[in-house]
Amino acid sequence: MGISSFQVKFAIVDPPCSGSGIVKRMDEITGGNAEKERLEKLKNLQAMILKHALKLPGLKRAVYSTCSIHEEENEQVVDEVLLDTYVRQNYILKKEVLPEWTHRGLKTYEVGEHCLRADPKVTLTNGFFVAVFERIKSKE
């Protein structure tokens, strides 16, 4: 029995990521070309996993999250997924997610204001990112 056989209404999409937001790992992150290539591969995998989840027939809401501070794994993934025709026709980013949380996504992205971010240097927490996709109600 495949996952599409289940009536999944809500999903948490927490794909493999760089883990760059975990404070203890921050010393291990080296940067450079190897890191850029790795981030590109992770971004592609994350977008593929998120798009797959959003195509589950009964899904009403999906929360996309990473423990990354890199825009490649966060806002760029959300941007790319929203370019998908099916996703664009069926989902919107939920607005005002956790309004008390003041640190939002990067302002250089249109989606940024609708996303949550934590950054060890700003929020004094481990780093994370959250975006909530909500299915557009059908007109039936």
Image (tube, rainbow, N blue to C red):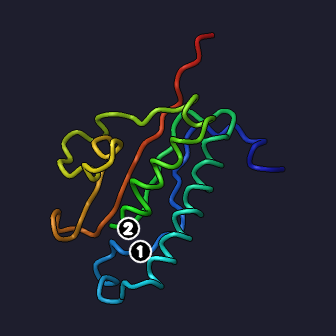
Residue at 63% in and 10% down: 140
Q: Mark 2 is on which residue type?
A: Ser
Residue at 30% in and 82% down: 26
Q: In the current view of this chain or complex, which residue is farthest to the top?
A: 140
Residue 118 x, y percent position in the rendering: 26, 60
Residue at 21% in and 70% down: 120
Residue at 15% in and 64% down: 122
Q: CA distance from mark 2 to mark 1?
A: 5 Å
Neighbour tally class for label 1: few under 14, some 14-19, many 20 plus, Cα within 10 Å: some
The correct choice, above or below, for 25 with respect to 16 in the image is below
- Secondary structure under the numbered disc 2 in the rendered image: loop
Q: Please say if the residues under marks 2 and 1 sit with CB atoms less than 8 Å apart.
A: yes
Indicate which disc residue 68 carries.
Answer: 2
- Secondary structure under the numbered disc 1 in the rendered image: loop
The correct choice, above or below, for 81 with respect to 120 in the image is above
Q: Mark 1 is on which residue type?
A: Gly
**Of residues 72 and 7, the one drawn nearer to the viewer in this rendering:** 72
> Residue at label 1?
19
Residue 102 x, y percent position in the rendering: 17, 48
In the displayed structure, does residue 133 sit left or right of residue 25?
right
Which of the two labelled residues, at mark 2 and mark 1, occupies the earlier sequence position? Answer: 1
In the displayed structure, does residue 25 sit left or right of residue 73?
left
